[in-house]
Structures are given as structure tokens and as C-alpha cells.
Image (spheres, coloured by chain):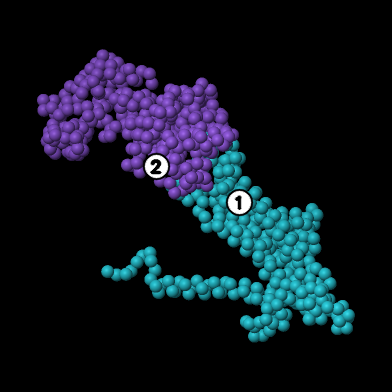
Chain colours: A cyan, B purple
Amino acid sequence: MSTYSVTEPSGRQKWFAGILVVLYAVITLLPLLWIIGTGFKSPADAIAYPPKMIFEPTVEGYVNLFTTRTRVPEDQLKALGEPTTWYDKLVRKNGVIITGASRFAERFTNSVIIGFGSTVLCIVLGTAAAYAFSRFKVPLKDDLLFFILSTRMMPPIAVAIPIFLMFRSLGLSDTHAGMILLYTAVNLSLSVWLLKGFIDEIPVEYEEAALIDGYTRFQAFYKVVLPQAVTGIASTAIFCLIFAWNEYAFAVLLTSGNAQTAPPFIPTIIGVSGQDWPAVAAGATIFLVPVMVFTILLRKHLLRGITFGAVRK
Amino acid sequence: MAQIRIENLRKDFGAFNAVKSSSFTVENGEFFMLLGPSGCGKTTTLRMMAGLELPTSGEIYIGGEEVGMKRASERDIAFVFQMFALYPHMNVRKNISYPLVSQGLNKTEVAARVAEVAKILRIENILEKPVGGLSGGDRQRVALGRAIVRKPKAFFMDEPLGALDAEFREHMAEELRALHDRMGATTVYVTHDQLEAMQMGDKIVVMNHGVVEQFGKPQQIYDWPATKFVAKFIGSPPMNFLEFDGAIDIGGNEINLAGTSVKVPVSREKRLGKLTLGVRPEHMRFRDSAAFAGRVIAVEYLGTTQIVTLETPHGDIKARTPSNQAARVDELIGLEFDTRTLTIFDSISGKALVSEANEGVLSHG
């Protein structure tokens, strides 16, 4: 009798797999941990060499991220009296005072509006198009689908100049609507193709059953197809959001004030004395949160095989 | 409940002609079988009746009303799919009540109707369960529940037992037939299984290549097939075909097989040339005195009966005889046919010749 088993790995194999997983996790998470750590360092610790693994944590970077400050002479600082808030107190140690809020909150809000706005639009249009391509006889269907995909056959930035000129003459430069439109246009092909795949997988009998049960085509789509496409919609939404959220090149080119998103803003954070790395890291950390939360929220849909077992194939 | 009438129904998918001019009538309360091999157009016919496909031409009447171009939801019918098509994101109760919700019934009435159906189908204990974990039989019952809950004019079923295990199939077939009798509902049932069709149907339509080959009661179709296709498709083993060159006159009742004379029912048609004698395996007896004989090449024992395969000058034939009747391989056995049950086919067209025996069945359809 040998103890060899096809399905159950041996103890040594399990150890080996475990070590590999941990190693991989460390490698992929290291930059993330570095960024999060830097956000809590003092400017001096942030640029210390060799890098400091153990340091005294401070939220100075976060305070700097959300404020604009100015350096004042020692005697003036004294004349101001005791600082009234904890963050005032924190910055005064460095001989500066807070003069107002920074634009980070505004840029971050822009990112939220543009990122989620284009994701919603992508999903709505993508689902409708994918459903039509999947279920109806569309003339030149294959050609149309290929054409839709072909919009992704070059890097979008290759058409930056025409888009820049178009946006300028249409008055879309530096507007939320313009950026939402642009990101939707770039992501829509991905969304149509991904969603078509998911909708193709849903047996057409469900809709037919609903049609016979007295529902209209739209009700059948809305009440029967959509709930089963949730898995696909969730993963497509994550892809769309991640792209729109992280997009840098077009944001730099097309936005400057009103509709500027966080990615072009964060690197421009300059402290009172040069580049403020802890503030930049703090900005990057906060910037990560929405996509992380969104992905975690939708994770259960990604994992749940909602159509499992209802149809025998 | 309603009568359903199909007139010259035709369906083309691009250049492919799926159904060619079908006509038949399903009487009120009938259990009606659409039988045929895969690709014969039976499912397409049913889908046109249900409103899931639009006919290319022809008419469909449900309860006297022409519905060919109407939406499925306007036809007041229920459909049971082969794969059940239970809504996977709803539990059993929601699945069954779904057609009622679309009709705008109030909650108490929906609950009452669902309870009634659950009782009929004996699925009260699984009402709150998700449909994903149900066994095949329970899924089938839920699908039936969803169909009967709205008391439609007619039920359409597309191979509803096709996805079930063989042993369970038999049981569900009985249950289905009992349910039909209890509800008295007009039911159209698509199947490729001739046994299922014979067992359950009041009437059968046999289709092949988009054409209605024959339409009638199971026994009429079994005994008096209108074409060679029907004769071969129905019955297991199928009808034996003995090809011969010969002639038969109006009023003639004899043909010549391998130099021996065989009595057949009195013919109402005159035909000369390539003909086929059709004989069911159970419609022949072993008789040493018979002039037409065959050599035994195989014997299959089936309990009370046996299937004996014999080699004759007109091809191999299978005989179903009581298993106590001795038949040894290589033995030469005389065969006597039951005259009243024989059918002669035109070998070229495949159509049965009308005779005294089958004229009652063949003349109306």
C-alpha cells in the first residue's frame, strides 16, 4: 500500500506551496506596505538612507496632504500664542502654520465622480450592447464586434492629439463630462466583449420562460438575465473602474483645474521645503482605498457561482 | 382549456427549411405527442405554437383565436423546458409564483395558488429551498408547478423528461399523465422517444424532415403506419421490411415472395414494381408447414419473449415469439404471417398502399 494520493498533496508539498504563496504575497505587497509606511514617516525618515524599517509614526504627511502651509519666523510664531488644534500643533514644530485646505479633497472627489461615472456608463451601455449582440440577429454582427474590439488595438494615448483638439473645440477640456465620456469610450469595448461572454453563458430558456410567464422582453432582461449576469457585471465593473481610476496620461493632458483627478495631482504635492514624500505617500494610500473597498464589496459576487446547478447541461 | 389547430405551418431559418407545411389538430383536453428524430422540426413546431418563434407562414389557432403573430405572453399557455429553466436566483416558492406576479394577483391569492399546486405535486416541504440544490425529479416538479399554477389554456412540454435518469423517467411519465388527467388540460408534448409517446399520448404526430408523416392514435399509428419511416421509427424492434419486385391489383390479396404465395389484406390500390412488405415482429408465427422460411442467425432472450433473427431470401427479419418456443441457430423455420396486420409500401415513395385493413386509418390523415 502506498500513501500516494492523486487529490491530497503530501505534507512536504503543502509546505512548499505555502512558502511559495507567502513569498509571492510579500513580493506583491511590499511596494504597497512601503507606500503605506512612508505615509506615516517624517520627511527626514522618508528619505533616510539606508531606509528605516523602524521609525516613529506620525500623521504629519496626512496633515500636509490636506493643507497648505507657510513658514513664519520664530518670533511671529510665538506671537500667535498656543496652537488650538492637534494638527496646528503638529505643523508648528516645523516652524510653519496652516494657511488653508489643499486641493486634494477636491481632486479626489473628481476622481470619484469621473471614475465611478464612467464605470456606471460603461456597464449600462456595455450590458445593453452585449445583450443585443448575444441574443438578437444583428446584421454584420461579427464585423461590428471586431470593429468594437479594434478600438483597443493601439494604446489610447496614440490618439491623444486628435482627442485633445476635439475636446478643445467641443468645450470638453477640463470638464467632468468630457473625462467620463473619454474613459467610457476607452473601456466600452472591453465591457461589451466581457459582458457578451457572460450573457452568452446564460441559457436563453430563462428568458423564454419569463416571456411565457407573461413578462415583456425588457422585464425578462431586467428581472431574469441581469440577476444572473451579476458576476460578470461585477468583474467588468472592477476592470473599468481600475482603468479609469488609475488613468494618468489623458488626465494630465486634458485636465488642469476644474476636473483634474487625483493621479496627476498627487505627484505635484510640494512641501514647504521641496518634495513632500510622506504627503505624496499619504495621498497614494488614500487614493487606493476606494478601488480596494469597491473590489472587496463586489468580491462575493465574483466568487458566487450564481447560476450553479439550476440548469443541467 | 382549448382546442389547438395548426394549418400549413412553415418555418425557414435562412435557407434552411425546418418545418414544411404542417397541419394537425389537438382536441380540447388531449395529451398530444409530437414525435420524431432530432432535427425533424418537432421542437420548432412547438416553439411556434408557444410564440417563441414566429412562423414563416401558416396559422396557429388556440381556442379558435389565430395567435401566430402574437407574443408568447398573450397566448395564455405554459411551457415546460427540457432543462427546466428554473430561475436560479429565486427559491422554489418564488419560481412557482412568478407567472402569477406578472398577472398582478394579490399576495394572499398567490400564496393560496402556490399552496394548492405544491400540494398537488407534493413539494410543500421544499418551497423555501433554492432551486440549485434540488434533485432532477424535484426540479421537474417545480417546473410543472410553475406551468400549472396559472391555469393556462394549454401546456407545451419540450422533452420534459429528457434530463432525468432512466429509472426516474418512468415514474415521472406516470405522474405527468396522472396530472394531465386530473387537470384535463390540453397538452402538447415533444419527444423523440417512441415508447414515451405510445405510453403517454392520446394522439401522436410523427414528423420527419419538417413534414408530418402521420397523425393519429398510438395504436393506429403502430398498427397501420402511413409510411416506411413511421413503421421503422415506432416499435422496438421496428417493423420488418421485405423488399420484392411484384405487382398488386385493386382487389388483389396475394403477393409472391421467393416463389411462395403470401396472403395480404385486400388492396385498394394497383401498383407494379418495387414494393416492400411490412410485418411487425410479433405478427408472425413459426410453422413448419409454411412455405416461406428463414434460417435462424441469432436469438435474443428477453424473459417471456425472445427476438429471433432469421435470414430470408428477402433480407433479415426479426420475429418476436414466446421464449418457450425453441429456435436454434442455423435451424430452418417456416414463417406464417398474420394476414390482417400486413402493410405493403411503395419502395420508392415509402408510402403505404391503402388496403381493406388500413383504409379506415389512412383515409383521414
- Please give the label number shown on residue A192: 1
Of B106 and B312, nearer the camera is: B106
Q: Is residue B322 above or below residue A201?
A: above
Residue at numbered disc 2:
B137
Q: How many marks?
A: 2
Is there any visible trace of residue B83 in the rendered image? no
Residue that appears at 30% across and 20% down? B358
Of A61 and B231, nearer the camera is: A61
Mark 2 or 1, which is nearer the eye?
Answer: 2
User: Farthest residue in the bottom direction?
Assistant: A50
Residue that appears at 80% across and 79% down? A92
Q: Quadrant of residue B202?
A: top left
Question: Left or right: where does residue B253 sit relative to residue A304?
Answer: left
Of A246 and B179, nearer the camera is: B179
Residue that appears at 34% across and 38% down? B171
Question: Left or right: where does residue B347 sit relative to residue A225?
Answer: left
Give the image location of residue B216, x and y in percent: 37, 24
